[in-house]
Each structure stands twice: as structure tokens, then as C-alpha cells.
Image: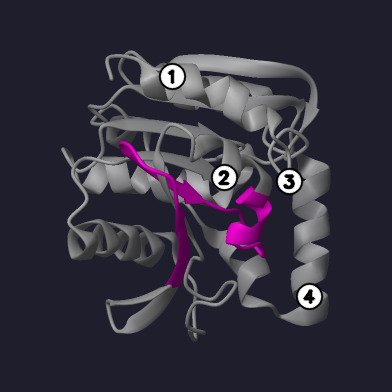
Amino acid sequence: MTIRVNGIDLYYEQAGAGPPLLLLHGNGESHRIFRRVMRQFAASFTVYAIDSRGHGRSSRVKALHYADMAEDVAAFVTALGLERPMLYGFSDGGIVGLLLAIDHPGLLSRLAVSGANIHPAGLRAGDLRLMRAMYELTRGRRWRLMLEEPDITADQLSRIDVPTFVLAGERDIVKEQHTRTIAGAIPGARLRILPGESHGSYVLHNAKLCGILTPFFQEDA
């Protein structure tokens, strides 16, 4: 399905019944990474897997910015009349989730993010070098986005007022201390570093994610 928000078309897929749950993918991906886990989440939630602007089947745009993606999700929630949905964001989707919770207090009821960073310096040096090389080679907007954004401060994170679950793999491209800093700045946030997992090994086309997150999303349901 497609919905018009902020002058662009956002593509999304919907499944299940129950409290609303938004799924946001990472850079260069689409809703398709959640195909497997979406079926599991749909047993307990009404799931909305969204293609971010410039990704998947959503509108192409001249430039990519996390703030614009966050405003798209806010507009999506309003347009569909969703009442305080929960949100899980992977990688860039996690960054978008953090910005959404910061800039739209009261919009979400729960937030889970994995493999998110709040500044490019939070990425491991080797991965940053690779991103720079890919940008020099392709001049791609998606590489530029990761090299220049986000720039979220601890003070901004401290304003997040919904239950938050911060995840990362032990071998994530995001530095572990950076992930711990994010969790530490969000009031009451819980943190889990997953042994043996990489940036997306437990997320991409992997049903393991549902087992990790469902208990969190069902608390106080």
C-alpha cells in the first residue's frame, strides 16, 4: 500500500491485528528485510513495515536526511490515525526512531532500536573508511547520509520519555561504548549487547528478532 505524506509517497505493508507496531529498515534496504519476522509479529500486533523515502518502493528524493524520514513517520502515524504505536528501528531506522521520540513526545508508546548511532564518530573506524571510499567512488546519497549525519546529543536523548530498549550486536559496526552511551542517556532505557552477533545478523530476514523484542512490546499491554 502507498500513502501520501509530506509531498512524497511512502510504501508500506500491513499485517496482523492488535496494538500497532512500526518497523523501520536500515540504509539501502526496504521493508523486505522484515518479511520473515513480520509474520511472527503479526500474531500479536498490527504491523506496518515502511519503506523510507528514497528506498524500496517509496518516492525518490534529491537528498536524504534523517530528520525528514522522522517527519515522514510522524505524518504516517497521523494520516492512519494510529494511537501511540510502538516502533522498532534497525540501523538508520533506529536513528529515525530516536529522532521521532525526541521531536514528537507522546507519539509513541514504546521504542526499540538496534545498531543505531547518534554521530558518525560512533561507527568503527574501519567501517567509516569503507563508507568514505564508497562515497568517493559512487557519490551516492546514502553513503553521504551516513558520513554526515546524525548529530544527536545526550541532552536530546534525555528528553525521550517512552520505555526504550537499545540493542546491538557484539560485533556491530557501531562501537559498543557508543551504544552504551545512547542507552545511558535515555531515562530508564534497557540495554542488551547480543553475544556473537554482527550489525544485522539477528535482524535481516531473521525470526530471532521477534523472540528478543516481543516480551518488551507486550509489557503492560
Q: Nearer the viewer, mark 3 or mark 4?
A: 3
Judging depth in this view, the residue of 187 and 212 nearest the camera is 212
Q: Residue at x 48, y 52 (%)?
A: 150
- Quadrant in the picture for the C terminus: top left
Residue assigned mark 2: 38
Residue assigned mark 4: 136
Identity, as a three-letter code, of the amino acid under mark 1: Phe
Please tell me how crowded label 4 is: few (under 14), some (14-19), or many (20+) other residues with Cα within 10 Å: few
Identity, as a three-letter code, of the amino acid under mark 2: Met
Q: Give the mark nearer the N terminus: 3 vs 4.
A: 4
In the rendered image, residue 146, in percent from the top left (x then y), is placed at 61, 58
In the rendered image, residue 44, in percent from the top left (x then y), is placed at 43, 31
Q: Give the mark nearer the N terminus: 4 vs 2.
A: 2
Q: Quadrant of residue 192?
A: top right
Identity, as a three-letter code, of the amino acid under mark 3: His
Residue assigned mark 1: 216
Residue interval drawn in magenta: 11-35
Reply above or below: 52 against 70: below
In the rendered image, residue 48, in percent from the top left (x then y), is placed at 42, 53
Check disc 4 and report its element: helix, strand or loop. Answer: helix
Reply above or below: 82 against 211: below
Check disc 1 and report its element: helix, strand or loop. Answer: helix
Could you give the CA–CA distance between mark 2 and mark 3, rounded to whole angstroms? 10 Å
Q: Which mark is residue 205?
A: 3
Q: How is the image coloured?
A: one colour
Q: Give the mark nearer the N terminus: 4 vs 1.
A: 4
- Quadrant in the picture for the N terminus: bottom left
Please tell me how crowded label 3 is: few (under 14), some (14-19), or many (20+) other residues with Cα within 10 Å: some
Please tell me how crowded label 1 is: few (under 14), some (14-19), or many (20+) other residues with Cα within 10 Å: some
Identity, as a three-letter code, of the amino acid under mark 4: Glu
Q: Give the mark nearer the N terminus: 1 vs 2.
A: 2
Q: Quadrant of residue 199?
A: top right
